[in-house]
Amino acid sequence: MGAWVMAGVTFREAARKKLLLMALLAGVAFIALFSTGLHFQVRDLRSQHVPRLVTQEAERAFIMMGLYAVDIIAVVLTALTSVDTLSGEISSGTIQAVATKPISRRQILIGKWLGFVAMLTIYVALMVGGILGMGHWLSGIVPRNLMLGAALIWIECVLILNLTLFFGTAFSTLTNGVLVLGLHGIAFLGGWIEQAGAVLHSPRTVTLGIVSSVIMPSESLWRRAAFEMQSPIVGALNISPFSNASVPSTAMIGYAAVYMVLVLVFAVRRFGRRDL
């Protein structure tokens, strides 16, 4: 019961700080920009009498770029909105006002986690739904495996959230943000290195990319989502940034899920032992 109370408090606090409003306004602006760009692309391609297959693949690629931007925005937003939730309250001493009440520390952290998960779930659903809805309306294109792709994007955001909670139990807000975004940056660069190594047939480069994914598997979740949603033709021809040259395996996705759960468990344990 205490965890659900804290979840509601976290949600109301985010609303009071206008985080939800600003995130939604930014999302609306992004979808408007995406829709305008897709509208002009569809109109120009069809007016030039480009073969229908080429037109469809170009429209699919545009939608995938929109989803890629949504993934980046959602990850960054998750980190920025949750980075101060523990570290800031611990450093300011406000956490003591909550910790002295008849709610265990485990319930406090799980409650905050539930509140943020609810927020990012709504945000990811609205953003992905907006991109897909406008994409279908303007082009008639519907990417493959929508639910699976959206679920992988959601898992990536939850993984980032869990990391911010974990580091927030031990470090300041600034250090927490640097660590989380730094690790995601390593994963991002490692994913592109792995793709490049696969295209150029460089086993050592591929291995380096895989090692970075083991350290931080967030980018592997997006690359698997892209593989599931994009056109098989574009992926097989390696003419897309999300080619099938090196696709994260099911084992890697399972590893990322275990990684995500363990980070949350360690966060709960560390917070329970932390001297406030």
Image (cartoon, grey):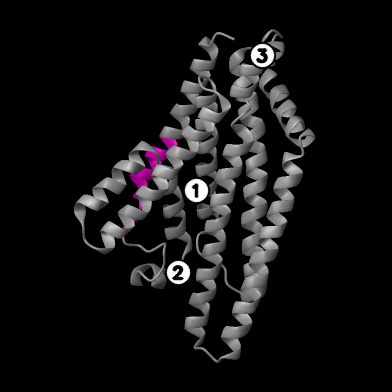
- Give the class, few, some or many, for how many residues have Cα within 10 Å of label 2's Cα (few <14, many ≥20): some
Image quarter where the N terminus lies is top right
Q: Amino acid at mark 1?
A: Leu
Determine whether, in the image, residue 24 is placed left or right of residue 70: right
SS for callout 1: helix
Q: Which mark is residue 231?
A: 2
Spatial CA span between label 3 and label 2: 52 Å
At x 39%, y 40%, the residue is: 254
Residue 234 vertical position relative to residue 215 in the rendered view, above or below = below
Amino acid type for the residue under numbered disc 3: Gly
Q: Secondary structure at mark 3?
A: loop
Please rate how many residues cluster around mark 1, counting C-alpha atoms within 10 Å: few if below 14, some from 14 to 19, many from 20.
many
Observer-nearest of 182 and 20: 182
Look at the image and tell me whether residue 86 can be seen: no
Tag in front: 3 or 1: 3
The stretch in magenta equals: 246-258
Pick the front one: 232 or 163: 163
Kindly identify the amino acid type of the residue bearing the numbered disc 2. Answer: Ser
What's the mark number on residue 152? 1
- Residue annotated with mark 3: 93
Please state the horizontal and vertical placement of residue 241, each as a whole percent of the image.
41, 64
The magenta stretch spans residue 18:
no
Residue extending farthest bottom = 49
| Residue 30 rendering spot, x and y as whole percentages | 66, 59
Q: Examine the rendering and report whether any part of residue 158 can be seen.
A: yes
User: Sequence-wise, which precedes: disc 2 or disc 1?
Assistant: 1
Q: How would you rate the neighbour count of disc 3 (Cα within 10 Å): few for under 14, some for 14-19, many for 20 or more? A: few
Task: Describe residue 202's horizontal placement relative to residue 81 as left or right.
Answer: left
**Residue at position x 61%, y 56% from top?**
128
In the rendered image of this protein, does residue 207 appear above or below residue 109?
below
